[in-house]
Amino acid sequence: MIQPHLQRIAIIGGGFSGTLTAINLARLSTVPLRISVLNCTYPAGRGIAYSTQRPEHLLNVAARNMSAFPEYPSHFVDWLITRTEYANIPEAELRETFMPRRVYGDYLRSLAWHYSGPLNSRSSVEIKNISIEVVDLIPETQGARLILADGTAMLADRVVLATGNEPPADLNGSAALCDHPAWCANPWIDWGKKLPAPGGTIVLLGTGLTTVDAILTLLALDWRGRIHAISRHGFLPQSHFKGVDVPDFPPSDVDLASLGLSELVALMEHHCERLRTLGANPAIIVDKLRPHTQRIWQAFSDKERQKFITHYAARWNVVRHRIAPSIHQTITAAVTSGRITTTAANITGLRAAGQKITVDLQPSGGAASSLTADLVINGTGPQTRFSATHSPLLRALLKRGLAQADAADMGLKIAPDFTVIQKDDQPSPYLLALGPLLRGTLWETIAVPELRGQALRVAQTLLAAAPNSLAAEAAVIEYCI
Ligand SMILES: Cc1cc2nc3c(=O)[nH]c(=O)nc-3n(C[C@H](O)[C@H](O)[C@H](O)COP(=O)(O)OP(=O)(O)OC[C@H]3O[C@@H](n4cnc5c(N)ncnc54)[C@H](O)[C@@H]3O)c2cc1C
């Protein structure tokens, strides 16, 4: 029997976003809550990014900026200091370190355990972790009924979508390869068992962070063979660096959000050029834009967003998503020594060639060519066309009109308080969303510095609506991105 004011909150997805939403609810609520975190595929608390077991996979953000709580910026570093292996590293050095991602996963798991375990001081808040996929959602008079992959159902008053990153999109010809021994469609699921014998050929599709992960693992395993990495531009990620001070960017008298795309690009190019002439790395300009990026994106017209995606997004991503200097050195050395070849070309098709796979390529302005490999890994990054999602749950939400894609078809349309907007343009009475699902609305919404603020804000929205909640006021904590 449900107590009269006991809210049942279902969080779908147990990566960083879902876990931190549950934790924030637990630490801020002054009313009893029953929270269920439903998660599948990757370990709860870790999600895709922090479930890697490989020590060479490092965070791409320094420890100082990886706190799970916006109002306690040193929380992750303080937690690291409690561990014997980091206790003797000077704090200033620790703050700048790029930790193994599995250690960050330990941090998240320890937080989740604390807030859902028996010593949770808010014992009136129950957090239950359930390993199962949610495949559908049916509105009820109050809240919704979640349909689970085993055919059972669960009732919830409020539901949070924290389903995270989608696997990479299909490529031309990839559907026919799903059972092929040389094909790896999801680079985040262990492909070690498919590793070809030394002397073979591996083709990595994409040259971003996922491909960097794969290269690091191949080098760590000392796998000897040919490694090709292919993308339209062929650029591997740049390194983080200690930038010069640029006090005049952004200019104090300019409202960046009201500039519009063309003027913004002109302003950035002007400042980048000035830094180049000074011999400084212009990537610092992209870093300095980060606190303003969401506001700028929201002020763009649909046409400007489309133009940005078509003309600037690839360049932006290379500069914005940088890697730890130590990783950059390793990758650069492997490219220089010829262990890795990068190619700039469009991937036009994939086809089986016996036990191998042939990748067809079209370099811009060059002749078509192909590469045949013993293993082809799709590292082209999470699928971004929302309406093409393979998630049964997200497809069901769209079909039932319980959600709609944003104008750029990159994710869900939401209200400023993270409530999902239904197909009839009305805010959902029970459904909220956060994380990479909001790319079309916020653009910058995939990394911890953004997601921790969202997880807090979503918890605040839920608590403000909890009947008899004192938490509406108690939970109003300033958060930053
Ligand atoms: C390889 C990689 C490395 C990264 N490194 C960093 C980094 O160093 N620093 C940083 O700030 N960010 C990093 N990121 C960004 C990363 O996206 C975020 O930090 C964060 O992990 C995203 O968490 P999430 O919970 O939103 O999504 P996810 O981690 O994708 O978790 C979502 C979870 O929901 C589950 N799920 C989905 N649908 C359902 C369903 N229907 N039913 C039940 N469960 C479901 C998924 O299986 C998954 O377990 C990295 C991302 C990747 C992919």
Image: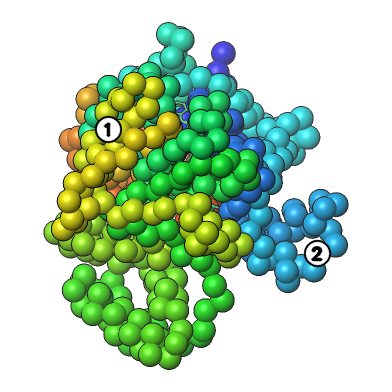
The three-letter code of the residue at mark 2 reads Ile
The three-letter code of the residue at mark 1 reads Leu
Q: Position of residue 111 (x, y in %)?
A: 68, 42
Which label sits on residue 89? 2
* Circle 2 residues within 10 Å: few <14, some 14–19, many ≥20: few
Residue in view at x 21 percent, y 70 percent: 261
Q: Earlier in the sequence, mark 1 or mark 2?
A: 2
The answer to whether residue 276 shows anywhere in this view is yes
The answer to whether residue 39 shows anywhere in this view is no
Residue in view at x 61 percent, y 25 percent: 128
Can you tell which of label 1 and label 2 is closer to the viewer? Answer: 1
Q: Position of residue 196 (x, y in %)?
A: 51, 30
Q: How is the image coloured?
A: rainbow
Q: Is residue 353 left or right of residue 127?
A: left
Q: Secondary structure at mark 2?
A: loop
Q: Position of residue 230 (x, y in %)?
A: 35, 49
